Structures are given as structure tokens and as C-alpha cells.
Image: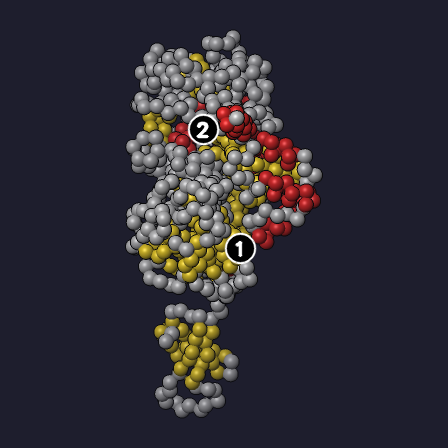
Amino acid sequence: MKKLSLVLMLICLVSLIAAYEIAKDSSGRPLYAADRIKVKLNEEAAEIVDEIIASERNFINTGLKALDDLNHHLGILEINTAHRPVKDKTWERENGFNRWYLIFVPKGTDIESSIELYKSNQYVENAIPEYYAYLAVTPNDPYFDDCWGHDNTSSNGPGSGHVVGFDSHVEEAWDDEQGFGSSSVIVAIMDTGVDYNHEDLNNNCIAGYDYGDNDSDPMDDSADEGHGTCCAGIAAGEVNNSIGVSGVAGGCSIMPLKISDSGGSLMFTYIENALTHCGDNNVDVASMSFGADISQGDSPSTDSAVSYAYNNGVTLLAATANDDYSHIHYPAAHEYVIAIGAASPCAERKDASSCDGEYWWGSNYGVDTQDARDAVDVIAPTILPATDVTGSDGYSTGQYITDFNGTSCATPYAAGVAALVKSKNPLLTPDQIRTVLRSTATDIIDEGPAGWDRYTGYGMVNADAAVGSVSGSGFPLCNITNPSNGESIEVGTIVTITVDASDPSRSVSNVKIYIDDILKTTDYSSPYEYVWDTTSETIDTHEIKATATDNELNETDDIITVSVAYPSYDIFTDDFETDLGWSIVGEFERGAPGGLGGNYGNADPTSAHGGSNVLGVDLTGLGDYDGDYEINLADRAYTATSPIINCTGYTNVQLEFWRWLNVESPSYDHAYLDVYDGSSWQQIWTNSAVMEESSWGQQSYDVSSYADGNSNFRIRFSIGETDGSWQYSGWNIDDLVLTGEGGPSASITVTSPNGGENWELDSTHNITWTSSNTSGNVKIELYDNGSFYNTIISSTTDD
């Protein structure tokens, strides 16, 4: 009987484990996340949930009984909005893009069964997994010297037996009127981030965003770093600077959009937010060297984001994948995305037996139906030199790698060609650019017949033929180079507005510069500029427009907006070298970090960001796990709360600090940043994924909605709740600064004389005063019956 019971128990256990097994893709990798479900609520439910999020930010009870019953049945941990707000509110409302939410579930949840439960709920329109995307690179060790994709000489590049001249002909393309590309053409690298400080990228990089960790720093520094920096160098590494590589479109701008979190995971919600960012921020071309083994329709929210970017003028290119299989991955398999395969230097598709010698991978190919959404469009060079993360943290120990491979390499190469075409004619639509790439590709007769085939699509991308097939736009090029779009300018600053204007086919007659639709200057020769004194400008947003006119009276405008703001002042700073009155609960400490902890993730730093001390969790080995936070902590069990900070009179308050943080994913452990708005605590940030940081990174948060004018503002860092296993080192914070514009009103009161006194000529008198919220010196003037008479002293110390 005991034996029978044991067998039954084992059978039950095996059945339970099998029920919770996560689906795998064709390469055996998890197809979706095990700790969250993506749900689209109906309008009634979404309105209620959004109100709760606005006030609580972290909750599980919605007040909708049928939904709450299901949530409690599954034991959910948290509900968060999935997407960033987009500019097109009509589209957002009609599409319901703002009604997608991420529901975090406990370990071991049967994701697919839970999705079916949500789909049957009266408040839910749809439910899907949170799919993973995977990078389309297959690294190995061999190094080679030159870029065969630019100029195939038979001796440069991998393997042997190259076909001389089988390349993209990009060197000839650079001789066309667009040259290396226009800086006004923006190429988004949607990837692991970009090393924007790299010597061969820094001049081309513009501001981007990190949607993996939801902050403004898209540095290529996740647990799986290097990939995005390589892609950036392939697409638009700087040209003619005597160093490094030559990107295909080295004159174009790079926008880094990071879609991996600190743990290196690429989740579809990150991708969706990056896509709508492209649509809202004038991106021309987006390179996506990643994919998932799913099809269009499997992730409706991603389909919507792809459509949003495409309909806002973004040319989208994506990798087909590296499995040598007969189906291409998504989003390459989306109808609005150009599917890019990889070419070998022997005039063939890169496969396991191609001449390059990299036998371990091949470029996926698609269906045998020309122009189908899941068919290959074109192929592009792979196994090429590329930029790498500066230092030893990327694929190599230096700043470059000579054999970046996969369809991950081919995709940014083709994106660079698309950027050259867009540079020559900025009026082309994404669909027109796709037609150009297809119609001008070099046909490959290898696995398929002449013309289009399922293996290589229309053939090898041909940059020279592509740019040669389009005429110039017939319009001058016009780009405001200073100030930057969205820049905040301190009132009183004198700003030189500069404009870069040219016309590849004609000559520029003049450039007009407007501020708020008022003409300020007309320049007839370069440099085109206007010196703007902002002293008398209103504290508001202002529009700057430049209009370039050529000798045939064709005109092109460039428009940016800037904000004129009060000077920014430090309201509160703390380098944690001395005790400024933080309230500490649990294992938070102020002190010198000693590199403790890291049972999982990374240990504490061995030195502060600046000075000697930091604010951190268990710096000295306080608990059961030296340097790490404890298990089974309650919600916000460890807290470090700032003293009261008086923000009276300040506006646009911003919080910045340097962070070194390690914490398990939010299905198990939580780190929080909260602020006190004068009446209640508000959550500003929490970890959306596992955080495993091994270096200091600066964090910035707009806290103006909570801090502006608040005399009782506070900041709180916390850890907890945590589960019963896996300890991480937690928070390390240094060099915290709270800034704001304006400040309390200054006042001066004269205490002597009192007024009404009679002074004799040539007599001497003391003038005394008190002041508040002033700095520097004061001026004392004498008035006669309200009219200025004389300056007694132009500047004296305010003491």
C-alpha cells in the first residue's frame, strides 16, 4: 500500500510540473515570460483601473468583482499599465492601445490556462502571453580585418572563395548627392542600448530612451550587452574620422532605444513602447535585430504598435532569424516590416554550408509566395567589423569586433541603405522605400530561380542602385542644429540659433528664422544663424522654425520647440558623507560600501560613486546574508526616508541620483522609489524585471507633480516584500540632487532709516536691511518723490 501511494504521489507531481511547463520556440528557448500576463480591459474596466493607478500606482484590487475574484484566485502580485502614452490620442482611444495591462503572477502559474480564464472574464477584451524576443546574432571567436559588405575583394571577410564585387556597392552610393546621409534622417536602433560615448558613434547619437528599465539612459549596459552597439556601428558608425568602422549611413543620426531590461530580457511590451516612441519622435528608419517564433496576430498589441510607427512614416526593418529554417520570425513576418535575411560573400544566402565557414547558423527563409508578409524581402551582408562597447564588457576586450554576424548584422546594414535613400529624398514613404530596396537588389541565383525566390527574396541589397533609382526631392534640406528639439533654456540666456541648409541639385537662396511665427532674420549665406536673447521671453514653450528657399523657390521647413524656464537651483543635495537626517528602517545604512553580498546578482560596489560613503542596504553585514537583503520581508520592510525638503516656490522639480541596484524580478522581490506629496506616499518607480547592476548609473525622475510648491516633500527608497529564496544586494545610492526652477520669492526690508527722517547735506548715515531667499549682492538707490535720483552703491554684500 505504501508503494502504491508513493507511485500515485509521483504521478501527481509529474502531472503538476508538466502543466506548468513554459512553451518553447523552435530553438528550445522560452517563448514567453513565466511571471506575467498581458491583458486588454474593456473601456469600463480600464477607466476604473486607470483611476486607481493614478492614486495608488501599486494595487491588485480593482473594485470589479468578477475581475477581482479571478485575480485573487490566481494570487496575482501586481497590475501595471503596459504602454507609454502616445501623441495620437484618437488612434490610442480607437485602438485601445492604452487599455493593455501587465498582470504579475506567482511562480509556477500556468500561464496558458490563466490566459483562457482572463479571456472568458466579462471585463477583458483579450489576453496574451508577454512574449520574449531574442537577438539574431550567433557570436564566435574568429576575427577578420575588413568589411566585405562594402567592397568584396575576395580576400577580406570570412572563409574563402568569395565572389569579387558581390557587395552592396555602398562606396559608389556615397558619391551620389546624399553622400553619407543627412543628419536630419534618424535611424532608431531598437536593441540592447547603444554605447553613445563610443569614439565612433558619439557624434551621431541623439537622445533616446530605455524602455527595459523605464529610464532616460539607453546605455548598452544590460546583462547581455554589446549587441546594440554593434548594430549602431553597422548602420551609422561615423565615416571619414580616421578611426574605427564606416557605417553604411555614417552621416545620419542614431537614436538608441533600449528594449532589454537590466537582466538582458527583451519583452514585447518594451518593444511596443519603443515602436510608438519612433512614431512620436520623427524617426525615419528603425532597425530591429531581434525576433520571436510567433506570427502576426499572436500579439495584437505589438501589431498595433508596428502599425502606429509605420503610419507615422517609420521605415521598419527586422531580422528573419538564424535557425536556417523555412519560416521567418516576427516582427520580420509583419506586413509593414521589411524582412532582412543574411548574405554570404560567395553570392549566396548565408546557410550552414556557405563559404564563410560559420557552419553553426543560417539565415531563415520564408514562404514561397512573392511579397507575402512572411516572405523574405532582401538579404544584406553579415559577418562584418562593427563597433563594440568601450572597454571589456561587450563581445571583445576592445572597442571593435571584426566578425559581428547573424541577421542581426544584415538588418542594420539594410537599414543604413534605407537611410541613404531617405536622405536623398526625404519625402519617400516607408512603402516606397521598401519598393526601392526590392526593385534595385542584386538578383542571386543559388537555391532559387532567377528573380524573386523564397531564400533570398529580391536579392542582395544594392545601395548604389537604390539611391540612383530615386531623384532628389526637389526641395532643399533644412535642419536646425542648435538648440536641440525639446531643450530647456534658462531665461536670460543668449542662444545662437544655427541652421544647416543645402540643396543637392540647386543652390540655397536664403534661410528665414522665425520664433513663434515672428520672422527674426533672413540670411542669404552660410552660416545661417540668429542670436536670440531670451531675457524678455515668457516662461513657456516656444516654437523655432527655419525655412530654406532654393533658387527655384522650393521651400523646406524645420520646426522645433524649446522651453524657456527659470534658472534651476539645487533644493537638496546629499553625497552621504555626513548625516543629513535620513530615517533608516531595517538594514539600510549610510557608510562606505565594501563589496559585500551578491549571493545572487552582483555584489555591492567596492567604492562610492563620489567620496567615500553611500546610502545602501546591509553595507557591513548586518543580517543573516552579509551584504544582501533578507528573505520573506514584508512590503517596504527596509526604508530610507529623507528629511523634509521644503520645495515652496519651486517648479519643475527633478530628482537625480546615482544607482547600483540588484534585486530579483517583481514576481518575487521588490525595490521601490516613493515620494511624499504632502498628504500621501506615491510610487515613482519599481523594478519591472530582475536588476543585476555592476556599475554606477545615473537616474533621473520628473517629480514635479508631487514636489512643486510642496513644503513637506520627502524621498523614500525601500526593499520588500521578498520571497523565501534568492537574496540580492539591494540598493546603493549616491550623489543625490533635487533641483527646481524659481524658488521662494526674495524679499528685502529696510530697517534703518525708518522713513520720514530729514538728513543734512554731506551727513553720514547707516542703511541697514534684512533679507530672505536672496543670494549674492544688493544695489541701493535713492529716489526723489518716486523718481530715480542717484545710485548710492551699485553692489554690496547682502550681509
Q: Amino acid at mark 2?
A: Leu
User: What residue did someone put label 2 on?
Assistant: 135
Say few, some or many: other residues with alpha carbon within 10 Å of mark 2 (under 14 / 14 to 19 / 20 or more).
Answer: many
Q: Is residue 507 above or below residue 448?
A: below
Which secondary structure, mark 2?
Answer: strand
Mark 2 → mark 1, Cα distance in angstroms: 36 Å
Image point 39% across, 79% down: which residue? Answer: 792
Single out the residue that lies furthest toward the top: 449
Image point 49% across, 51% down: which residue? Answer: 635
In the figure, is residue 321 to the left or right of 580? Answer: right
Q: Is residue 69 above or below residue 755?
A: above
Q: Quadrant of residue 766?
A: bottom left
Q: Which of the image's four quarters has the C terminus? A: bottom left
On residue 682, the disc is 1
On residue 286, the disc is none
Image point 49% across, 25% down: which residue? Answer: 3
Q: Nearer the viewer, residue 341 or 468?
A: 341
Q: Is residue 238 above or below residue 160?
A: below
Q: Is residue 59 visible?
A: yes
Q: Amino acid at mark 1?
A: Gln
Q: Nearer the viewer, residue 450 or 471?
A: 450
Q: How many marks?
A: 2
